[in-house]
Structure formats: structure tokens, C-alpha cells
Amino acid sequence: RREHRVSVAMESSISDGTNMFNGIVSNVSRNGFKLTDIPKKFNTSTSCVTVISGKGKNFKFHVMPRWQKEDIFYKEIGLKIISPSLKWISFLKDLEYSVI
């Protein structure tokens, strides 16, 4: 991995165009994040829309699934952010400094 990742515990809602699910964002980077606790029926074959909420802020992204791992009930998904905003990049910088 080239991107620096920051461990977090943020909430996310994600839509595959048919269904909407809630999950947990466990780490973030400038261009992507890892989403856990998503039901197995979530469709990862197409781009999606997600809203991440944390530290009193909300971020809406168009994302593309890059990888997934499944257990009996849930998926863990790696998502690439399509065109991350300056607001997101600034938020990440603040997160990195608050973790250190």
C-alpha cells in the first residue's frame, strides 16, 4: 500500500443502487477506506454512493469496491473514493495530527 491509513471507528451508510446498508469504517486514507459489518447481499460489482459520519461531520462519496472478504453473514469491503474532496483531505490531516 502506498497510502497512509488512519484507524478510525466511524459510521457509514452505503447504497448499491438497490439497497441501503449501515456499516463501520475501520480505516481511512486520502483515496479510500475499509468498510466492515456490511450484509453479504450488498452488491460489490458496481460503483456505490456512501455517506461517512464522524467527529460531527458528514462526507458523501461516489466509491468503487476494490476488494472484499466475507464471513457467514457479513462483508468487509475496500472502497476507492472517486474524486476525494478537499474537505475530506483536510479532515484526514486533522485526524492524523489528533492520533499522534
Image (tube, helix red, strand yellow):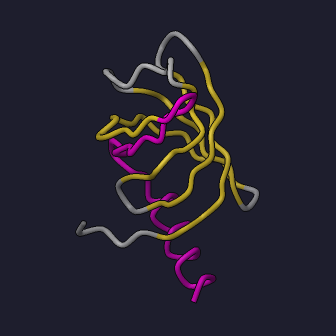
Farthest-out residue, bottom: 100
Q: Residue furthest right?
A: 56
Q: Farthest residue to the top: give it.
A: 18
Q: Residue 73 versus residue 65: which sits nearer the camera?
A: 73
Pinpoint residue 1: horizontal percent, then vertical percent: 24, 66
Q: Nearer the viewer, residue 100 or 71?
A: 71
Q: Quadrant of residue 51?
A: top right
> Does 29 sit above or below residue 59?
below
Horizontal and vertical percent for residue 81? 37, 45
Spot occupied by residue 15 in the image (x, y as percentages of width and height)? 53, 23
Q: Residue at x 46, y 50 (%)?
A: 34
* Residue located farthest toward the left when viewing the structure as drawn: 2
- Residue under the image location 37 percent in, 38 percent down: 68
For the C terminus, the quadrant is bottom right
What residue is rendered at 52% in x and 9% in y? 18
Say left or right for 40 vs 69.
right
Between 25 and 92, the one lying in front of the other is 25
Tell me: residue 91, above or below residue 75. Answer: below
Q: How many marks?
A: 0
Chain part drawn in magenta: 71-100
Q: Residue at x 39, y 51 (%)?
A: 84
Q: Quadrant of residue 91?
A: bottom right
Residue 93 is covered by the magenta coloring: yes
